[in-house]
Image (cartoon, grey):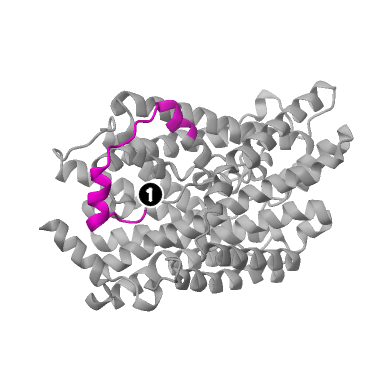
Amino acid sequence: MSAADVPVPDGAATTGAATKRVKAVATPRMTWVTLALMTTSSVASLRSSPTMAVYGLACVFLYVVPAIVFLLPTALVSAELASGWEGGVYNWVAQGLSKPLGFLAVWCQFAMTIFYYPSLLAYVASTIAYVVDPSLASNGLYTAIVIMVLYWTGVWVSSRGTGAVAGLASWGLIIGTLIPGALLVVLGFVFLGQGNASAAPMSVDHLLPAWTGLASLVLIVNNFLSYSGMEMNAVHVSSLKNPGKEFPRSMFLAVGMVLLIFILPALAISWVVPADQLSLTAGVMQAFDAFFQYFHIGWLTPLIAVGLVAASLGGMLTWLAGPSKGLLMISRQEGYLPPSLQKLNKHGIQQNILVAQGVVTTVIALMYALIPNVSSVYWIFSVITTQVYLIVYLLMFAAAMRLRRLQPDHPRGYRAPALGVLCVVGLLASAAAMVIGFVPSSQFGGGSIWVYIGIIGGGLLLLGVIIPFGFLKASKPEWRDPAVAAAIEEEAA
């Protein structure tokens, strides 16, 4: 998932008159190349590069494997679901499994952002630090303050429904990924071309990560979250002229571009920053700083930092508006959340949900001030984010298999080849990633393994089980929005 420019998730169900209006409008055509570029912009990001750069040349293996077992199955399976059922992941899971599990899927899309925002803003804080004072990048109190200030500023901006959010996010791929990524790679090749030795071994025998137990492969879990978001662009499959042929072609092109954007910058970082000195939050700026100092162009550091920060903040604002809106619409339709959380402000924004989420985010941000190692906190939050989001994919793959079996004749604009195999591979990969996520990374530090497992397991249990099922148990028919309920009944009639 791109930290900079992920599109608004499609968790919201399309209901009533809105559905009729959508159906009344002719679906605009889109080329398969355009869809590939959209997918690339929604998935690719530089934020995860440092986590893989610690493995040097082995990062190629660690990126390619999850692309095969997770990225492709997700893209192809979600394309079939999107071309046959409107309403995004909620409707897919509700139709294939049950409405409560559909709510769980939408809830997990929303809940993963609770830990996503602190980890994203910690990356922003470390990037800003390289302009102000590089030593602040490892200062927990500074990181916590930046997280809280930027998050609440984001809530304030989002609650006013500003149109600037879309504009800022749409430029994320260019100013926050393509330009910095290309510059990083070019500087890296020039650096090596001038006879400088790589900080990480680049010989063939380092293509595979050194095996030191499960901990040596744990960082691959973070790549599952890096690749998440493919299901969001699947809603555009019906815009293609020939979905059966063009969508797979588009996805393979997107996978190739995403891999290049992920792998090359990670390698460039490993060439100039030794693994034992690499920060998981500030690694990108560490590499730029090292290259700029070497080439005597340090004046570029603030410009790169501004681009990375602007793109990341655009992504945060997009995600503030997206998952929470999807959760709101489903709750107004089915009565899953109490009326106090369903209220809109005068700009039509779900401000109460954002504020409630902000209180939790503030508490989490304080952990950066309390735990000495910022990279360790960042890694913990990244893993919890991944664990919660993996629940969405487990439900999606299971729903896709059941829908193919229960509704084989339901109209689909695209039918994924070997759907059963794709779903089984995706399920096994997601489950394996969830299990591996409980193993502390070799870069995590020397803390207690059981404390780590307790934090990860507690976060997953609280966000992925206890809270959503608590809402389901407490839900009442009168919590449904009368206008939404009436629109649904009108459409059914």
Where, quadrant-wise, is the C terminus in this rendering? bottom left
Question: Mark 1 packing: few (<14 Cα in 10 Å), some, or many (20+)?
Answer: many
Percent x, y of residue 454:
53, 67
Q: Name the residue under label 1.
A: 393
Percent x, y of residue 214:
56, 47
Compared across the picture, whether 33 is left or right of 469 comes to: right
- Amino acid type at circle 1 is Tyr
Q: Which residue lies furthest to the right in this view?
A: 296
Residue at the image point whose x is 70% and y is 71% from the top: 370
Q: Is residue 444 visible in this depiction of the protein?
A: no
Give the quadrant of residue 332: bottom left
Residue at the image point whose x is 56% and y is 53% from the top: 164
Q: Residue furthest left?
A: 493
Whether 282 is drawn above or below 446: the answer is above
Give the quadrant of residue 109: bottom left
The residue nearer to you, when weighing 453 against 330, is 330
> Is residue 22 on the magenta stretch?
yes
The residue nearer to you, when weighing 363 against 23, is 23
- Secondary structure of the residue carrying tag 1 is helix
Whether 247 is drawn above or below 276: the answer is above
Percent x, y of residue 201:
74, 30
Compared across the picture, whether 280 is left or right of 10 comes to: right
Compared across the picture, whether 312 is left or right of 104 comes to: right
Residue stretch rendered in magenta on the structure: 11-37
Residue at the image point whose x is 86% and y is 36% from the top: 297
